[in-house]
Image: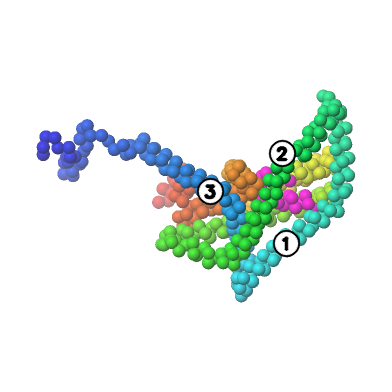
Amino acid sequence: MGLFDSSPRSVRLDDSRPLRVQQAGKPAILWGDAFGTLATRSLQAIIVVGVAAVVILGMLQLTVVVIPVLLALILASAAAPVMSWLRRRGISSLWATLLTLLGVVLLLGGVSWLVVAAVRDQWSDLAAKAQRGFESLMAWVQTLPFEIDQSQIDEWIATATDFLTSAQFGSGAIAGVSAVASFITGLVLMIVTLFFFLKDGPNLWEFLLRPFRGDQYDRAVRVGHKTVQTFGAYLRGTAAVAAVDAIGITAGLLILQIPLAIPLGVLVFLLAFIPIVGATLAGILAALVALVTHGWVIALIVVGIVVAVNQLEGNFLQPVLMGRSMRLHAFAVLIALTIGTVLGGIVGAILAVPLTAAAWGVIQVWDGPDTPARWARRKPKPEERVDTVAAG
């Protein structure tokens, strides 16, 4: 061995096993220490966040396509049991799809007709009561400890009138027309996509699974089944809970003879698809109508009815209808709602929770039918470890 030989040397210990040692003065591997591991993980996290940001930005640019497809997928997942039942009866996929879509159209058409008829019959009475309520509000304002004279009220009214007749409001109206056009485009796309998901959903999914082999194929199958199951269970459970909320609150409004009780009940049903926030908004709207038409005493009774129905739903109906696997922590729901609202507005708030539930469901079957991903598995408690060791 030469004097300046820099190759690692082997040293034999007493047990005659060679041990390779690092020569003095040779630098250590830069990425092999704790700081290098931290840098590696940070770089991986930056790459993952960057890819996710690019995907989200791309989806936001294609909301007219992405949102209808997601809605169609959720609706098709909810209708999957009906399609399976019709197919087992010997009905072809085409006719089963047409019958399912016809049932949805009849249901939505019947509800829309009911709402329009109620609004048309009670609108004049509500307008008169609203005018009297506004006059009572103005009279109450005059009794406040601080003074608000009529000139200030007239100035506020003039400001609102100027805004309604301004170019800014006109540009907003033009933007509203554009939004309506986008809505119609998205609705047509959703209906067409829903038709193909119902008719050829299993074939489309099998086509997407062709690149996978072995364990990857099994995992992709589990992910697909769990996603469809989660979307369907969420939509059916939420619809059942929303229907109970709407029936209970509508019954209370009808007993109290609140105008537009049926439209308010339909609004309660729709807003119930936004967890936590939707029930609060529905209660506020119902209480405002009661306040304008019947006074603050009846409005407080309406608030009590809304709170009682929401407590019944949260403590009894959701655990039974939604199932334990669909229950997300309230903190996770709030974070998902916030992110969904920021990214997609009202539609984003509606889609945030089912997407979060589906993602959590996928994690639960990542390594097997009942085996979550390794990092998501529940760690045994200390007493459970002691029991396991004692049993062994």
Disc number placed over residue 168 in the picture, else none: 2
Give the residue pinned by disc 3: 58
Total of numbered circles in the picture? Answer: 3
Toward which corner of the image does residue 130 lie, by quadrant? Answer: top right
| Residue 69 point in image, percent of width and height | 59, 56
Separation of disc 2 and disc 1 at Cα? 39 Å
Q: Which mark is nearer the camera, 2 or 1?
A: 2
Separation of disc 2 and disc 3 at Cα? 30 Å
Please provide the residue range marked out in magenta. 262-282
Which sits in the foreground, 353 or 347? 347
Under mark 1, the amino acid is Leu
Report the colour scheme: rainbow
Relative horizontal placement of residue 211, taking residue 337 as reference (left or right): left
Task: In the rendered view, tell whether residue 15 sits above or below residue 64.
Answer: above
Give the residue pinned by disc 1: 107
Q: Residue sitting at 53 percent across and 48 percent down?
A: 58
Q: Earlier in the sequence, mark 2 or mark 1?
A: 1
Q: Residue sitting at 17 percent across and 40 percent down?
A: 7
Crowding near pointer 2: few (<14 within 10 Å), some, many (20+)? few
Quadrant of the image containing the N terminus: top left
| Residue 313 point in image, percent of width and height | 69, 50
